Image (spheres, rainbow, N blue to C red):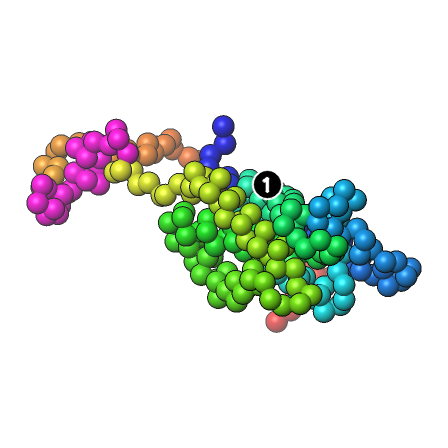
Amino acid sequence: MKSKKDLFFKIDIKTIGIPLLAVLVIWLVYWAEIRFGLFLNPYGVQPRSITGLRGIVFSPFIHGSIEHLYSNTIPIFLLSFSLFYFYRKLAAAVLIGSWLFSGAFIWFIGESYSTHIGASGIVYGLASFLFFKGIWSKHYRLMALSLVVVFFYGSFVWGILPGREGISWEGHLGGFIAGVLLALLYKKYQLPQKKYTWEEANFNDEEDEFMRHFDKDGNFIPSSELYPQGEETTTDITTMDDTKVSPPRIVYCLRQKTKGDKHSD
């Protein structure tokens, strides 16, 4: 079984590649709509409609305007990058879970005869997961990430409330709930705290070379008192090779100078 440290803090092709790929795909879909005159809105989530079920999968790739696309591009990249960097082994499950749960949530509670498109549900799911997982982890780096998420995306909380026309608050709320549930589901995945040698169960301070220099009151004991003259210490001494080596030989070759020889002054 791999160490839990493998779950966290690792940059590789997946960490950067998947966020870039996600952004590239949604931009390519929007470009294809404009370039070929496509109308993909019917592939969004249509609540309680059988054909609308396909929107659970396809809706995050469809955007209604360039402004809509811009508003999701940066959050998708930054939040998914943070997810794959800090939670390497959990990232795929959290991303897919936020994706499917937010879409299914819209399908169940959304207004009839409406169509919901966009990746906002995923954005809310990732932001919610990163915030709550970081707070519950009680690890300083993950808690710092939670504060960063609040600083940049704290205003997103208003998006889960109904009232704004044309805004899929159901998708936002579904993503938010998905993030909370996923943070609870993976709550047991904690980053192992750094453990020092003296914190190990089998540590014996009487055998430790460093700890032997301190008495029971914490006073330092110099080596001259700890090791009386003539007593060998437990410190390993590198064995020196005392094999004699012959000195190098220098051979001079002399020849008689001729008239054609030149030299510089």
Residues 227 and 92: in front is 92
Helix, strand or loop for disc 1: helix
Q: Does the magenta run of residues contain 120?
A: no
Q: Residue furthest front?
A: 112
Residues 140 and 225: in front is 140
Identify the residue shown where x is 62% and y is 45%: 101
At label 1, counting other C-alpha atoms closer than 10 Å, the crowd grade (few under 14, some 14-19, many 20 or more) is few
Q: Residue furthest bottom?
A: 265
Q: Does the magenta run of residues contain 206?
A: yes
Q: Is residue 19 visible?
A: no
Residue 240 vs residue 109: left or right? left
Residue beneath disc 1: 93
Circle 1: residue type: Ala
Which quarter of the picture shows residue 257? bottom right
Residue 260 position in % (x across, y down): 73, 61
Q: Which residues are magenta?
A: 200-223
Residue 107 position in % (x across, y down): 68, 48
Q: Residue furthest right?
A: 36
Residue 240 vs residue 131: left or right? left
Identify the residue shown where x is 76% and y is 66%: 65
